[in-house]
Image: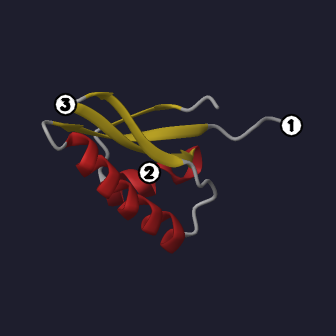
């Protein structure tokens, strides 16, 4: 049986408040996940430097279009986890 493919939706934040803004954005992603009853509950923040952080959420491939249109991420990549 083949696993469902998952996609990591990514929002980039740059500047002095990048981490703080990314953390705030994750709260909205969590609310969206609950409201839309999405299958995965993988989301979070990754900090790459003092000036660059991302917020992300992982979705099933079948949910990607709906999430993309609703939340407009900056980019996406296949999720391996």
Residue 1 quadrant: top right
Residue at 61% from the left image edge and 28% from the top image edge: 80
Q: Answer with the quarter of the image where residue 19 lies.
A: top left
Disc 2 and disc 3: Cα gap in Å?
Answer: 30 Å
Image vertical order of residue 8 relative to residue 29, above or below: above
Q: Which residue is mark 2?
A: 65
Q: Is residue 54 left or right of residue 21?
A: right
Q: How far is mark 1 from mark 3, CA to CA?
A: 43 Å
Q: Which residue is mark 1?
A: 1
* Callout 2 secondary element: helix
Q: Residue lying farthest top? A: 49
Note whether residue 57 is visible. no
Q: How is the image coloured?
A: secondary structure
For discs 2 and 3, the disc positioned in front in the rendered view:
3
Looking at the image, residue 16 lies above or below residue 43: above
Disc 1 to disc 3: CB gap under 8 Å: no
Using the rendered view, name the quadrant where residue 81 is placed: top right
SS at badge 3:
loop
Which residue is disc 3 drawn over?
51
Which of marks 3 and 2 precedes in the sequence?
3
Q: Residue furthest right?
A: 1
Real-space Cα separation, disc 2 to disc 1, in angstroms:
24 Å
Quick one: which residue is furthest to the left in this view? 15
For discs 1 and 3, the disc positioned in front in the rendered view: 3
Question: Mark 2 packing: few (<14 Cα in 10 Å), some, or many (20+)?
Answer: few
x, y percentage for residue 41? 59, 55
Give the camera-side residue of 32 and 19: 19
Mark 2 vs 3: CB contact within 8 A: no
Q: What residue do we see at 37% from left, 50% from top?
A: 68
Residue 62, visible in the rendered structure: yes
């Amino acid at each position: 049986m083949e696993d469902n493919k998952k996609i990591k939706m990514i929002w980039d934040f740059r500047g002095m408040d990048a981490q703080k803004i990314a953390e705030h954005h994750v709260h909205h992603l969590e609310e969206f996940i609950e409201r839309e009853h999405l299958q995965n509950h993988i989301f979070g923040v990754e900090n790459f430097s003092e000036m660059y952080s991302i917020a992300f959420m992982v979705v099933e491939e079948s949910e990607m279009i709906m999430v993309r249109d609703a939340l407009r991420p900056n980019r996406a990549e296949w999720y391996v986890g």
